Every structure is written in structure tokens, then in C-alpha cells.
Amino acid sequence: MLFGKAGVDADRDEANASLDRKLRDLLVERYGDSIVSDFIATIPGSWPDVIPLMLSHKSVRGYTSEPLPAGTLEILMAAGQSAATSGNMQTVSVVATTDRAAILRLADASQRQAFIETCPLFLSFIADLSRAERVGYRIGVDLFALPLTESFLTAAIDCGIFAQNVVVAAESIGLGTCYIGGLRNKPDVVAEELNLPQGAIALFGLCIGYPDKHKLTDIRPRVPQHVAVHREKYSVADEEAALSHYDEISARHEVRQKRTVPAWRLRHRDRFANRVYLAEREQLKDGILGRGFPLK
Ligand SMILES: Cc1cc2nc3c(=O)[nH]c(=O)nc-3n(C[C@H](O)[C@H](O)[C@H](O)COP(=O)(O)O)c2cc1C
């Protein structure tokens, strides 16, 4: 048990103890402090290694030049393709870029985020209805649902699910990752770089490589679980107080990382009310339409 169990089966407790302690520490790190101790105390037993692996996630923004072992891309892609996919339509494509000059160009198109240039492998995740269109053409069927918003959305959802399997697989073998939403800034530039046909759009990138230990950060705390996870019915009771407390937790975290970012609630201003930050993404709908998704 997380907080000790009197008497019974001491050997098993001993065997489980390290995982449990690790899990408890990870939960405290993930949520920031004692605010979670009540719910931690309700979690019994020990859990398989994949759970602490997932709870250990942190984005990595700096990589060593160490090459990835042979077979890494193939294994990561198999993990991604093993994810659930809407109707088994598999409307996801990935372009894997290892060429330094090409990664530089993709970094340039992604708000020039310098750390991207250090990764040995850059994956672009493509919502891809072009394959379905080609299949439809070959089997002689008018796939009239392809232009629907629904079809774009399912491809986008599948991209996220595929990618997160890749992230978990990569982290399980000691690699670091960072998603790159900046790839949506210039859909046409990216499409040309990757040779995408109409009906295919890069939704986000993913840097993969061995973490540069000097650039590592701590686990970034999340909002208290009861703010994001609702039991039976959605409720905002206690949200204000909980988020105010989370502001303190996240501010302390950012100071420890030597980052000068405002408290979490104020970051909404930077993210959702800042035209400079949004850059070209204010026009993203036009970009999506232009890539051949009518969003009907
Ligand atoms: C779809 C998506 C796009 C993202 N784009 C970027 C990006 O362009 N640059 C960046 O530094 N981080 C990016 N991130 C990483 C988030 O900033 C990060 O996940 C978040 O701050 C939480 O930190 P953590 O991943 O370390 O827990 C992105 C994350 C997601 C899911």
C-alpha cells in the first residue's frame, strides 16, 4: 500500500515498495504538492511500470548529437500504428525527417524554435485524407463524406492518438520528445517541404532524440485532478480556489526552471489573447481549406 500495510505479506510489500514510493513521488511532482495527498492516499497497491513511465513525461527542448539506434524509427512507428484509429480508416501519415538541412527548414517554418534544430529525428504528423481519396478513385466510389468537417476531425484525432503512442514508446527507451504546434504556422510552406498532396496537412511535429541533460526540466505540474476530471457531472465548484492554488504551484515550478513566465491563469492572456504569439495561426482555417479540406 502507498502508506504502508500492517503485518500481511511483508515480502510482497517490500517488492512493491520501491514502485509505490516512486509512483507517489511522481504524483506529488505531477500535481505539485500536498493538495493531492488526499487522493493519493486512496490509491491502493502497486502499478505496472508503464504508469510511472507515463507520469514521468516531460517535454525535452535540447538533444545530444547521439544517433538513434537502428530500428528505432520502425519500432516507434509500429507503436504509433498500433493505436486505435477511427473506423480503422488510418487517415494518418507521418513524414520522418533526418536530413539536417530539411530539419532546419522545418524549424524555420515553426516559429524558428532553435531547439528543433538539435533533434536527430523530426516527425511531421499529417491528417491525410488524400489516401482515402485515391482509394475511392480506384474502387470507383464517390466518397462524399471526405469533405466533411467530421472527416478532417477524425484524421486530426487519430494523429494525436498515434503520436502519443510514439511519445510513450520513445520515452520508454530513454528518448526525449517535444511536440511542435508551430508546424501549423505555414501549412503551405511545410506541405511543399514534405511534398504533401492536396488532402494532406501537417498538424504538428515531434522532435525525438536523446535529451541534452543540461536542458532538462522538472516534471511540469498539472491542474488539480478534480478541476479537470469530473465525477458523473461537470462541476466548477471549487475551481476558482483550486486554480488560484495551482497558480502558486506553477509559479514556483517555473522559478525553479529559471523561466520567467507568468502564473498559469495569466498565461491564458499570452496564449489566447496575443496576436504575436498566435502568429499565422489566426489564419489557420484558410490554411486548412487551402490544403483541400472543405470542412463542410
Ligand atoms: C500539440 C502540441 C503542440 C506543442 N507545440 C509546442 C511547440 O511548438 N513548442 C514547444 O516548445 N512546446 C510545444 N508543446 C509542448 C507543450 O508546451 C508541453 O507539453 C506543455 O508545456 C506541458 O509540458 P510537459 O510536456 O513538459 O509536461 C506542444 C504540445 C502539444 C501537445
Image: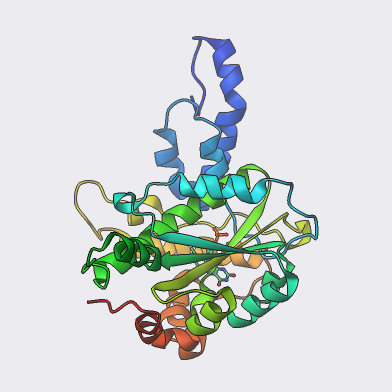
Q: Nearer the viewer, residue 84 or 70?
A: 70
Above or below, comparing residue 232 to residue 203 in the picture: above
Residue under the point 62% across and 76% down: 106
Above or below, comparing residue 197 to residue 211 in the picture: below
Residue at the bottom extreme, as displayed: 275
Please say whether residue 241 is visible from this viewpoint: no
Relative horizontal placement of residue 289, taking residue 67 as reference (left or right): left
Question: Which quadrant holds the C terminus?
Answer: bottom left
What percent of the width, then of the height, locates residue 19? 58, 30
Residue under the point 41% across and 77% down: 198
Coloring scheme used: rainbow
Could you tell me how many numbered marks the image carries? 0
Please say whether residue 115 is visible from this viewpoint: yes
Choose top left, top right, bottom left or bottom right for residue 120: bottom right
Residue under the point 34% across and 61% down: 135
Above or below, comparing residue 115 to residue 238 in the picture: below
Relative horizontal placement of residue 186, taking residue 290 as reference (left or right): right
Choose top left, top right, bottom left or bottom right for residue 252: bottom right
Looking at the image, in which quadrant does ligand 1 appear?
bottom right
Relative horizontal placement of residue 282, taking residue 107 as reference (left or right): left
Q: Nearer the viewer, residue 163 or 143?
A: 143
What percent of the width, then of the height, locates residue 16? 57, 22
Q: Nearer the viewer, residue 12 or 95?
A: 95
Choose top left, top right, bottom left or bottom right for residue 269: bottom left
What percent of the width, then of the height, locates residue 254? 60, 66
What percent of the width, then of the height, locates residue 213? 76, 56
